[in-house]
Amino acid sequence: MMKAQVYTVAKIFEGEIKEADLKLEEEELPPVQDDEYLVEAMYLSVDPYMRAYAKNYTVGQVMIGIQAGKIVESKNKNFPVGEIVVGNLGWRTYTLVKPSDDYFIYILPDVGNLPKSIALGVLGAPGMAAYFGFLDICRPIEGDTVVVSAAGGAVGSHVGQIAKIKKCRVIGITGSEEKARWLEFLGFDYVINYKTTKDLAADLRKGAPKGIDCYFDNVGGDTSSTVMQLMNQGGRVSVCGAISSYNAKVPLRANVIQPDIVAKQLELKGFVSHQFRDRWMEGLNQNLRWVQENKLKYRETITDGFENATRALMGVLKGENIGKALVRVKASHVEHESVDFNNALSKFKKFQGHR
Amino acid sequence: MMKAQVYTVAKIFEGEIKEADLKLEEEELPPVQDDEYLVEAMYLSVDPYMRAYAKNYTVGQVMIGIQAGKIVESKNKNFPVGEIVVGNLGWRTYTLVKPSDDYFIYILPDVGNLPKSIALGVLGAPGMAAYFGFLDICRPIEGDTVVVSAAGGAVGSHVGQIAKIKKCRVIGITGSEEKARWLEFLGFDYVINYKTTKDLAADLRKGAPKGIDCYFDNVGGDTSSTVMQLMNQGGRVSVCGAISSYNAKVPLRANVIQPDIVAKQLELKGFVSHQFRDRWMEGLNQNLRWVQENKLKYRETITDGFENATRALMGVLKGENIGKALVRVKASHVEHESVDFNNALSKFKKFQGHR
């Protein structure tokens, strides 16, 4: 009899998440039947949307989330033992998957020497958000000026690098010096620390002397209202997230954006990664190729131990992570250490960004 | 020697427009040369965008605007005497048009017994805003629920009727009982007076029990933030105007809309009529056909006398007009009286709209 640890929702999140909002429980799993298989979680993805979706949660449900895990037992020939699967199995250490379940689940293609955690970052939902959300909605062309907010996160840092691959000028808005430095290292042309800038509009004008063509928005609120003012005719805005609102108990207020939408005939489009499910492998394979060609770098902020997952989520909502935030379920799953960016960065001359 | 009266910008508008912001001047026009023709203004269009564009004005320039006029002298065989032309000639009683000018100008097709003023309303820029802005951007399908703000205006009332032609459920938001009653008469399914409602969200929920699929937005601000909360997955928002902001001296603030844009994967698109210039005649002819088939009704608020044009514009920005606001340049141009809606309305039983 297999025992799984499971996080359930103890209290619908209100304002900032507290540790007591999620409860760690134990669950007994029945034996594997025909066509079923058992997945042992290796990594849990920790994402801002988990806060945004809270109003749809019910007390007692298993906490949602995508994980990468290993098939440890199987009576399903399409999902053999040893394969790594990625799926929305929630925050559980073990999951018995039945073919009748409507999980979005797939076997991770061969990633060579790369760590399997990449399945949740550059090759996972954030990677698809960056790939489809930027290319399909912002439709960048060579020479465009692109602004990315929450640029130090998994999605933002990825978007900026795709924009560089597409020969755009890229401006990142981020919230710490450490993240800013990393973004410069990644090739961002201009980086603004929104926490220390005295005049975001003035900084944006310096960074984007030709105005802004594409805006990849992870934050919403007044930061976005300011970006919108500086957009060019026909600009495209990909609305990936609105993290500035997620912890707010009453609706956040900001300068209205409709006058700019009309005056410049802007297009804004919200999206979620899973709407691109039918093209998922296109995004996954292209992102993998860029990583292998060293055109796409990524960073991970790994929290060790299933028991620390709630704290990891709290950190993400405070912007404590750089790059993809993950929980490594067991120490035995250590297969890599993150690339030592601090070492690389120490050799990297400071860029001309204004912060 | 022909003398024209011309409005020039005396002061860049700030806050509410004042009469002294525009100056009435006289200008001598040279004789008509080869390929030129002389247009005598019949009607001036008066529109909210004239306030919105103010920051691009320069003191001394001729006030912008579209007019319908008659060709009274011509040395251009493509524009013969007697034809009615529509063009962005500005607020002038007479205009000498040279082929080298980059006016957007065209001869009004035969409208039969209909008054020529229709050229600026249902068949003019507002009509094109309604036709293209709604059909191309909102992409309504049968059974959709459509919300229109500033529904009593030229564009809004037109959009609502197209939505009915397309078999949608239509909810109008307007600012007076008189307009509300008119909208019900036009076939709107539900009308909300935003000035008297105690709870716009609750009223919208009553009017749109299945949620909102399309929003045609003329106002921006908190009204729009509230509509956005009730939109369905994949909803489309056509942003035609932001009249709530136009007179504001400091940027208006409202509840942020990005969380709804992401959560429901909404699409918002701003536009201006003239971006559809290459399809203008498609819109004009379809609107004309609907008018002739009695599927599309319109109303006009006509101010008599060129000397009252500024006041007409001030009225539009206060929402005083019902339907298309026009200036009839000379009393001699009276060719019709507006359809007597008051009479028709007196026979019309009040609808179940909540106001």
Image (spheres, coloured by chain):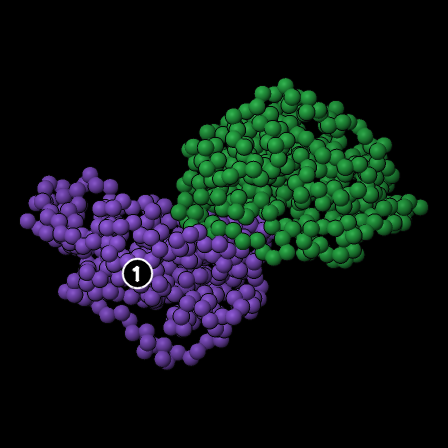
Chain colours: A purple, B green
- Asked which quadrant contains residue A173, the reply is bottom left
Residues A137 and A320: in front is A320
Q: Is residue A277 visible?
A: yes
Residues B176 and A151: in front is B176
Residues A345 and B11: in front is B11
- How many tags in the picture? 1
**The residue positioned farthest toward the right in the image shown:** B1
Q: Is residue A165 visible?
A: no
Q: Image point 90% across, 49% down: which residue?
A: B28
Q: Chain of mark 1?
A: A
Q: Image point 39% across, 78% down: which residue?
A: A348
Q: Amino acid at mark 1?
A: Met
- Asked which quadrant contains residue B73, the reply is top right
The residue identified by callout 1 is: A314
Q: Image point 30% across, 61% down: which residue?
A: A314
Spot occupied by residue A30 in the image (x, y as percentages of width and height): 9, 44
Spot occupied by residue B325 in the image (x, y as percentages of width and height): 71, 37
Spot occupied by residue B158 in the image (x, y as percentages of width and height): 61, 33
Secondary structure of the residue carrying tag 1 is helix
Q: Image point 47% across, 56% down: which residue?
A: A221
Q: Residues within 10 Å of mark 1 (few under 14, many from 20)?
A: some
